[in-house]
C-alpha cells in the first residue's frame, strides 16, 4: 500500500503526531507513504497543505490519512476541510480531559513554550553532550555523574542506545566497549570498577554482529564470524561473572532496550 499517503500535520515539530500515528499504523500490515508537515501555524499554510493532501488523493485514487496535533481552531478547521480521513490526536483526548478536570486546556503549540527556559529541555541537552563525550570509552571524566554505563562488544548497539536515553529521557549514559585485551585480562576495564553498579550490558547474536561489522570492515578478522562468536561468548561470560545485567539487542528495538535499562537501573525516571 505504498501508493497511499499518510500525512502528519502539526503546528509544532510533528513528532507527536507521527509517533502516535505510527503506533496506530503499526497494527496494520501496510507500508504507506509518510509525509510530515510541521509548523503549519497559519491559515495560508493550512490551505497549502490541504491542496497537497487533495492532490495526493487524486493521484493515488485512495483517500489520504491525516494525523494532526494542530491546536489553533482556525487552522484546524481549514485542515479538516481536506478530502481525507482526519484523525485529531489532540482533540480526541483533550475534550474528555477538559470535562474530567473541569477546566479548559491551554492549547499550547508544541511541547515547549520556550525551550531555552525549560529545565527539562536543558537537562536533555546536558545528557546528549555527556553521551557524546563518553561514547566508546573516550573519556572517564565525570563518570561518577553517569546514570548508566553501557558495556558490550563493538557494534552491539551501545551508541544509539546511549543517545536515545539522553534525547528521550535525559539520562546521562556513557558506553564502554569490551575488547579482546579485556578478555585476555579476564576483568572489566579499570575505569569501570568503581561504577559497576551503574553498568548494564548489551550482547548480540554473533551471526548478526558479523553482518554488521562486515558492512564497516568487510573481510576483516574483526568481522569474521569465528571472532564474533569468541568476543560475544567472552563478553557474556565476563558480565555474568561480574554480576552485570545484560540483554540481547539482536531482535529488540532501541526503545525496548532503553525501557529495560530504566526499569532495572533508574525506575524513578519512568515516573515524571
Image (cartoon, rainbow, N blue to C red):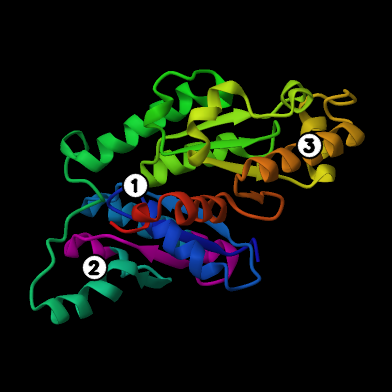
In space, the residues marked 3 and 1 are separated at their CA atoms by 44 Å
User: Which residue was labeled with disc 1?
Assistant: 13
Left or right placement of residue 248 versus residue 174 in this view: right
Q: State the image coordinates of residue 194 (x, y, percent, origin top left).
A: 49, 29
Q: What residue do we see at 27% from left, 52% from top?
A: 11
Residue 130, image quadrant = top left
Please tell me in which quadrant of the rendered image residue 218 appears: top right
| Mark closer to the observer (2, 1) | 1
Q: Residues within 10 Å of mark 1 (few under 14, many from 20)?
A: some
Residue 219 image position (x, y, % from top left): 90, 25
Q: Residue furthest left?
A: 103
Q: Position of residue 165 (x, y in %)?
A: 45, 43
The local crowd at label 3, few if under 14, some if 14 to 19, many if 20 or more residues have their Cα within 10 Å, is many
Which stretch did the figure color magenta? Answer: 56-78
The answer to which of 50 and 130 lies nearer the viewer is 130
What secondary structure is found at the residue carrying circle 2?
helix
Quadrant showing the N terminus: bottom right
Q: Earlier in the sequence, mark 2 or mark 3?
A: 2
Residue to which mark 3 is pinned: 234
In the image, is residue 70 part of the stretch drawn in magenta? yes
Q: Left or right? Give the position of 22 relative to 166.
A: right
- Labels 3 and 1: the sequence-earlier one: 1
**Cα gap from disc 2 to disc 1, whole angstroms:** 19 Å
Can you say whether 186 is above or below 94 in the image?
Answer: above
| In the image, residue 94 above or below residue 197 | below
Which-is-in-front pick, marks 3 and 1?
3
Q: Which residue is mark 2?
A: 77
Amino acid at each position: 500500500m505504498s501508493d497511499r499517503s499518510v500525512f502528519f500535520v502539526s503546528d509544532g515539530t510533528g513528532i507527536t503526531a507521527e509517533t502516535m500515528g505510527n503506533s496506530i499504523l503499526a497494527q496494520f500490515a501496510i507500508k504507506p507513504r509518510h509525509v510530515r508537515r510541521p509548523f503549519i501555524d497559519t491559515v495560508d499554510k493550512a490551505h497549502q497543505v490541504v491542496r497537497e493532501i487533495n492532490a495526493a488523493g487524486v493521484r493515488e485514487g485512495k483517500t489520504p490519512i491525516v494525523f494532526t496535533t494542530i491546536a489553533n481552531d482556525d487552522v484546524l478547521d481549514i485542515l479538516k476541510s481536506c478530502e481525507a480521513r482526519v484523525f485529531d490526536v489532540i482533540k480526541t483526548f483533550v475534550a474528555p480531559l477538559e470535562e474530567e478536570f473541569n477546566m479548559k486546556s491551554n492549547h499550547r503549540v508544541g511541547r515547549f513554550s520556550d525551550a531555552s527556559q525549560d529545565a527539562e529541555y536543558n537537562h536533555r541537552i546536558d545528557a546528549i553532550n555527556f553521551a557524546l563525550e563518553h561514547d566508546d570509552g573516550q573519556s572517564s571524566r565525570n563518570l561518577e555523574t553517569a546514570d548508566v554505563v553501557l558495556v558490550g562488544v563493538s557494534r552491539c548497539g551501545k551508541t544509539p542506545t546511549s543517545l536515545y536515553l539522553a534525547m528521550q529521557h535525559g539520562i546521562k549514559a556513557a558506553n564502554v566497549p569490551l575488547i579482546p585485551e579485556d578478555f585476555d585480562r579476564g576483568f572489566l576495564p579499570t575505569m569501570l570498577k568503581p561504577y559497576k553498579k551503574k553498568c548494564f550490558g548489551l550482547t548480540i547474536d554473533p551471526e548478526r554482529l558479523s553482518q554488521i561489522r562486515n558492512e564497516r570492515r568487510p573481510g576483516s578478522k574483526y568481522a569474521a564470524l569465528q571472532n564474533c562468536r569468541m568476543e560475544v561468548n567472552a563478553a557474556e561470560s565476563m558480565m555474568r561473572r561480574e554480576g552485570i545485567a545484560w540483554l540481547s539487542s539482536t531482535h529488540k528495538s532501541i526503545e525496548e532496550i532503553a525501557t529495560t535499562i530504566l526499569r532495572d537501573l533508574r525506575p524513578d525516571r519512568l515516573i515524571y
